[in-house]
Amino acid sequence: ENNILSKLPLRGKKFLVTAGPTYEAIDPVRFIGNHSSGKMGYAIAETAAEFGAEVVLISGPSVLKLENDFIKIIRVTSAEEMYNAAHEYFDSSDVAILSAAVADYRPTEVVSEKIKKKTDNFTLHLTKTKDILASLGEIKKQQFLVGFALETQNEEENAKLKLKKKNLDLIVLNSLRDEGAGFKSDTNKITLISKDNKTLPFPVKPKTEVAKDILEYIIEQTNA
Ligand code: CTP
Ligand code: CA
């Protein structure tokens, strides 16, 4: 079609995107977090909306602002809150892209008063959080499920294992080793790995361009 609609390849599609870090409370004033900025997930949400999709963005703590007023943003803090929000919206989604840097562990107990400094050594007990992506992989029906993988060794091999274990349709391997890639950066270097284990590497690009690459690939795959 050579009209305005041809620029909206995702019109009528519902997207669920997770982004940013999670914060796991230790006491009323402290938490365990990570350096994720949310830039990659926000760029994916904005680009999907530009392509005509109806987007729900579940965001951990982030200072980023959305340009597109039509994106529904759900702000959460902890992995558990993100899990609950993701499950609320997953059923009705066509595509779910989980780019959040979810904490793998949370403090086993959240203390209600600020912990006072006493002994020279202090041990914090941690409990594994629920894996949101894997839990969606278990209940997935029509949804095209996309995960990210952050690896520092045996990158492709580990990403392929995650793809299979979590029942994904696509995994985006993030290369932290390369110059201009990673958490705080405005650029990223990715390799896409599909369910049939085909790998597609991309050069370092701005995260907005990376978002386009990922979405164009998803459009290709879901129309196939
Ligand atoms: N993820 C998730 N819930 C968690 C942990 C991870 O949804 N509790 C998702 C991330 O959003 C990402 C994918 O799982 O899409 C892979 O995250 P990653 O940290 O690379 O892998 P893990 O499975 O957590 O394994 P590890 O950290 O040990 O490599
Ligand atoms: Ca992890």
Image (tube, rainbow, N blue to C red):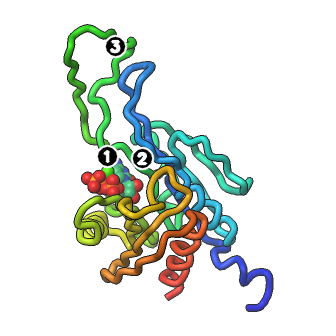
Q: Secondary structure at mark 3?
A: loop
Disc 1 residue: CB within 8 Å of ligand 1: yes
Residue 156 percent across, percent down from the top left: 28, 71
Q: Secondary structure at mark 1?
A: loop
- Tell which circle, 3 or 2, labels the residue nearer the N-terminal end: 2
Q: Is residue 114 visible?
A: yes
Q: Residue at x 48, y 62 (%)?
A: 97
| Residue 197, image quadrant | bottom left
- Which residue is identified by label 3? 115
Gap in angstroms between the C-alphas marked 3 and 2: 27 Å
Which corner quadrant of the figure contains ligand 1?
bottom left
Q: Which mark is residue 3?
A: none
- Which residue is identified by label 1? 130
Residue 37 versus residue 25 in the image, above or below: below
Residue 112 percent across, percent down from the top left: 38, 15
Residue 17 percent across, percent down from the top left: 52, 58
Disc 2 residue: CB within 8 Å of ligand 1: yes
- Tell which circle, 3 or 1, labels the residue nearer the N-terminal end: 3
Q: Are marks 1 and 2 in contact (CB under 8 Å)?
A: yes
Q: Is residue 132 visible?
A: no
Q: Residues within 10 Å of mark 3 (few under 14, many from 20)?
A: few
Residue 119 versus residue 74 in the image, above or below: above
Gap in angstroms between the C-alphas marked 1 and 2: 8 Å
Q: Residue at x 41, y 24 (%)?
A: 30
Which amino acid is tagged 1?
Lys
Q: Residue at x 46, y 76 (%)?
A: 202
Question: Nearer the observer, disc 3 or disc 1?
Answer: 3
Residue 86 versus residue 189 in the image, above or below: above
- Which residue is identified by label 2? 83
Residue 93 percent across, percent down from the top left: 53, 64
